[in-house]
Image (cartoon, rainbow, N blue to C red):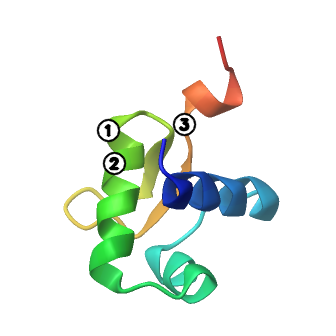
Amino acid sequence: MSLLEKEVLRLVIRKGKDITPTEVEKYLKLSDKTVKKVLTQLVEKKMLVPASGTMRIRSYRLGRQVNDPV
């Protein structure tokens, strides 16, 4: 897992609720393209799941893999 992925997860855990790509951009001072890439990677790893939207995902929350580590 990359440092950026860890930081995004840390931010979501600390916040305790859904997070938007804009919040991640501001917190990590990254471009929207980079943030979308990291969020997509975390969704593929099932660490995050889309919280709203189907075509355009507007927020994310922790996935079960993070909530219930095996």
Question: Percent x, y for residue 24?
Answer: 54, 76
Mark 1 crowdedness (10 Å alpha carbons): few <14, some 14-19, many ≥20:
few
What is the distance, in whole Å, between disc 1 and disc 3 at their CAs? 11 Å
| Amino acid type at image mark 3 | Gly
Asked if the residues shown at circle 1 and circle 3 are in contact, with their CB atoms under 8 angstroms apart, the answer is no
Quadrant in which residue 27 is drawn: bottom right
| Circle nearer the N terminus (1, 3) | 1
| Circle nearer the N terminus (2, 3) | 2
Helix, strand, or loop for circle 1? helix
Per the rendering, the mark at residue 44 is 1
Per the rendering, the mark at residue 20 is none
Residue at figure coordinates x 29%, y 63% from the top left? 37
What is the distance, in whole Å, between disc 1 and disc 2 at their CAs? 5 Å
Quadrant in which residue 53 is drawn: bottom left
Give the residue at mark 3. Answer: 63
Question: Percent x, y for residue 3?
Answer: 55, 56
| Amino acid type at image mark 1 | Glu
Nearer the observer, disc 1 or disc 3? 1
Of the pair 9 and 20, the residue shown nearer to us? 9
Asked if the residues shown at circle 1 and circle 2 are in contact, with their CB atoms under 8 angstroms apart, the answer is yes
| Amino acid type at image mark 2 | Gln
Helix, strand, or loop for circle 3? loop
Question: Percent x, y for residue 25?
Answer: 49, 83
Residue 70 in the figure: left or right of residue 40: right
Give the residue at mark 2. Answer: 41
Residue 67 in the figure: left or right of residue 41: right
Question: Percent x, y for residue 54?
Answer: 26, 56
Residue at figure coordinates x 34%, y 48% from the top left? 41
Of the pair 60 and 47, the residue shown nearer to us? 47
Q: Quadrant of the C terminus?
A: top right
Residue at figure coordinates x 47%, y 65% from the top left? 59
